[in-house]
Structures are given as C-alpha cells and as structure tokens.
C-alpha cells in the first residue's frame, strides 16, 4: 500500500514538474526570401552611390468624406465654434479611426478649449499613427509642448 502511494505521488510530482517545464529560448530567425542571396557577415559590401536612402511611408490617401469633415471642422474653428468643430472631428474619427491628421486636428481644438490633458493625449495618439509624416509629428509636438506649458503655468497662478 505504501509502495503504491509512493509510486503514485512520484508520478504525480513528475507530471507536475513536466507540465511546468518550458523549452529553452531560441531567438527568432530572420525571414529571407529563398532566391535572394544574403551577404556574409564578413563582407564589406556597400550600397552603390546611386542607391537612394529609404523614404518614410507616404500618408494614406484621405477619403473625400474625411477631407470634407476636416475642412468643415477647420471652418468651424475659424468661426470660433469649437464645440461643433470637436463634434465634427469626433464623427470623422468614427469613420476613419486611424487618420492621424484628424487626431491632430482634434488635439488642436482641445488645446483652444483649454483642455490641456486631452490635447496632449490626442496629439500623442496622432503621433502613434503618423508613421513617417514629420510635419504632422512636429505639429503634434508643438501642441504637446504648448499644452504642457499652459498646464504648468495654470497650476502656479
């Protein structure tokens, strides 16, 4: 009886230990096309002078609806109707939630509405979607810096 219990406990312990074991870590292997020769690590090959540097990805084409919404929101902002501009941009973001320019435009509206925390968050969201659009990223960074300065100034007054 004791032998059966010992064997059962030993097997149970072995199963538990094996169940918790994980295979050793292996770094992922890079994907290479089969037909493309890979340069050796020791090779000192350089790109030809005519090779162009990699360009950032182009912005996604804007649909006519999103473009119209952006223009309508700009007009509302110029007229000082910030609440309607924000509502219009939010509607546009429901249509195109990955449009970095709409997020940036909404961040600018929130900045004008003195909603500094929202302006910072929205500009950061826009940056995360901007890809290589350096102009948009700079505009968002300006919104973030302005909102942070205004928020810090407001605290100390």
Image (cartoon, rainbow, N blue to C red):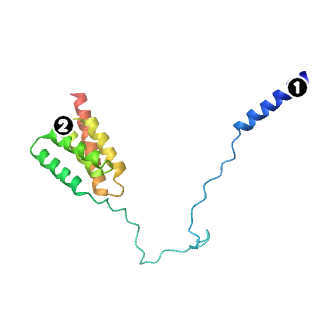
Inspect this view and state whether residue 103 appears: no
What is the number of callouts on the image? 2
Residue 2 placement: quadrant: top right
Q: Label for residue 33?
A: none
Left or right: 45 in relation to 152: right
Q: Label for residue 4?
A: 1
Residue 107 placement: quadrant: top left
Label 1: few (<14), some (14–19) or many (≥20) C-alpha neighbours in 10 Å = few
| Residue drawn 41% across the image and 78% down it | 50
Q: x and y percent of residue 59 in the render?
A: 31, 59
Left or right: 63 in relation to 130: left
Element carrying mark 1: helix
Element carrying mark 2: loop
Q: x and y percent of residue 98 in the render?
A: 33, 50
Rendered view: 97 above or below 51:
above
Residue 87 placement: quadrant: top left
**Residue under pointer 2:** 113
Q: Residue furthest top?
A: 1
Q: Quadrant of the N terminus?
A: top right
Rendered view: 153 above or below 105:
above
Query: Which sits in the foreground, 117 or 32?
Result: 32
Marked residue nearer the N-terminal end (1 or 2): 1
The span from disc 1 to disc 2 (Cα, nearest Å) is 77 Å
């Amino acid at each position: 009886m004791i032998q059966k219990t010992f064997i059962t406990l030993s097997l149970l312990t072995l199963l538990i230990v094996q169940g918790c074991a994980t295979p050793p870590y292996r770094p992922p292997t890079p994907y290479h096309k089969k037909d493309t020769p890979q340069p050796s690590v020791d090779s000192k090959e350089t790109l030809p002078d005519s090779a162009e540097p990699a360009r950032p990805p182009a912005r996604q084409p804007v649909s006519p609806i999103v473009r119209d919404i952006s223009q309508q929101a700009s007009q509302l902002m110029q007229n000082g109707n910030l609440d309607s501009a924000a509502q219009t941009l939010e509607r546009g973001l429901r249509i195109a939630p990955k449009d970095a320019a709409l997020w940036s435009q909404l961040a600018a509206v929130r900045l004008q509405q003195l909603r500094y925390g929202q302006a910072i968050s929205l500009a950061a969201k826009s940056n995360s979607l901007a890809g290589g659009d350096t102009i948009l990223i700079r505009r968002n960074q300006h919104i973030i810096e302005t909102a942070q300065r205004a928020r810090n100034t407001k605290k100390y007054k």
